[in-house]
Amino acid sequence: MKTSIAATVYNSITWLNEKLGGGFLNSMPTDIWSSLYTKILKLAGATIGNGSKIHHKVIIQHPENIILGKNILIPASTDMAGMGKIKIDDNSLIGASVRFITNHHPLDDKTLTREEVLRGTQKEILIGKNCWIMNNVLLIAGKRGLRIGDNAWIAAGAVVINDVEPNTVVGGIPAKLIKSL
């Protein structure tokens, strides 16, 4: 019952912010609105550790699938709208305009109907501790899900479709090993 009330409050404030556009919610200082947005997401089912904050312009459609450790900052223009689980461990840094894509459309599965293929399946994206995901990165879970190891860095503009080993730097399209740290 508590979650459904919280989800209603979350949906109402999100709707109000969209309708007002440049209204009072957008004129509030970012840190105040982001703190409020983060608290609302917690009430709606997100798990958010101490010192973590989500900018109020981050797109989140399923807060119950978001798990953030301590000291995570999610900037504006990030898209975490996927229906699959997204977990980011402690002290990781997320750049602007990062896209978390948790859905997979199994085109080669002949047992599924067209509607089931379009709806897709949901996989998880797991990011380890002390990672740095730079600006404009696409994280695509694909068939198996996606794991980014502890202390990994992902270069700006990379498209990550395979797991990233701990203590490495990857970049490019698709992302490949640049060097070990």
Image (cartoon, rainbow, N blue to C red):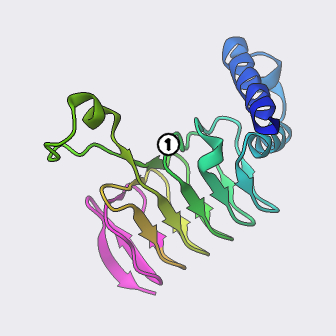
Residue 155 lies in the magenta stretch: yes
Q: In this view, does 40 lie to the left or right of 113?
A: right
**Residue 92 pos. (x, y %):** 62, 68
The outermost residue toward the top is 19
Q: Name the residue under label 1.
A: 83
Question: Which image quadrant is residue 4 in?
Answer: top right
**Residue 178 pos. (x, y %):** 33, 77
Q: Which residue is drawn at 36% across and 58% down?
A: 158
The outermost residue toward the bottom is 181
Crowding near the residue tagged with mark 1, few <14, some 14–19, many ≥20 C-alpha atoms within 10 Å: many
**Residue 180 pos. (x, y %):** 40, 87
From the viewer's side, name the closer residue of 164 and 116.
116
Image quarter of the N terminus: top right
Q: Residue at x 34, y 34 (%)?
A: 119
Q: Which residue is drawn at 65% across and 35% down?
A: 57
**Residue 42 pos. (x, y %):** 77, 46
Kind of residue at disc 1: Met
Q: Is mark 1 on a helix, strand or loop?
A: loop
Q: What stretch is highlighted in magenta?
A: 153-181
From the viewer's side, name the closer residue of 30 and 138.
138
Q: Is residue 86 left or right of residue 12?
A: left
Question: Which image quadrant is residue 28 in?
Answer: top right
